Amino acid sequence: MTTRGLVLLALLVLFALHHDLWWWDADDRVLGLPIGLTWHVLLCLAVAVTMALFARVEGTDDEGPS
């Protein structure tokens, strides 16, 4: 699998993890925030890093824009 394919797979996994049904009714708190909100903050950071990696991978494409 190519690097581009791995990054796209990572984005699909992050999209699936976005639907955090397991924490909808949780009352736990992490760093003073509800655990669901903390999860989404961390998820947004992971998506930002993955998209930056995707931009870097797409920027090294020798074929140019498609």
Image (cartoon, rainbow, N blue to C red):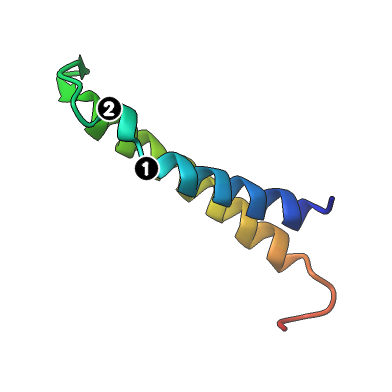
Q: Are marks 2 and 1 in contact (CB under 8 Å)?
A: no
Label 1 crowd (10 A; few <14 / some 14-19 / many >=20): few
Tell me if 34 is positioned left or right of 39 in this view: left
The numbered disc on residue 23 is 2
Which residue is the site of mark 1? Answer: 19
Amino acid type at circle 1 is His
Which residue is found at the position 74% from the left and 55% from the top? 5
Question: In the structure shown, which secondary structural element does the residue marked by tag 2 occupy?
Answer: helix
| Residue 38 x, y percent position in the rendering | 27, 29
Q: Quadrant of residue 44?
A: top left
Question: In the structure shown, which secondary structural element does the residue marked by tag 1 occupy?
Answer: loop
Amino acid type at circle 2 is Trp
Tell me if 13 is positioned left or right of 2 in this view: left
Which residue is found at the position 40% from the left and 39% from the top? 43
Q: Distance from label 2 to label 1 (Cα)?
A: 10 Å
Tell me if 7 is positioned left or right of 28 in this view: right
| Residue 12 x, y percent position in the rendering | 56, 51
The number of numbered discs placed on residues in the rendered structure image is 2
Image quarter hosting the C terminus? bottom right
Along the viewing direction, whichever of 53 and 8 lies nearer the viewer: 8
Which residue is found at the position 84% from the left and 50% from the top? 1
| Residue 9 x, y percent position in the rendering | 65, 49
Residue 48 vertical position relative to residue 62 in the rendered view, above or below: above
Along the viewing direction, whichever of 44 and 55 lies nearer the viewer: 44
Q: Quadrant of residue 20?
A: top left
| Residue 57 x, y percent position in the rendering | 71, 59
Along the viewing direction, whichever of 3 and 62 lies nearer the viewer: 3
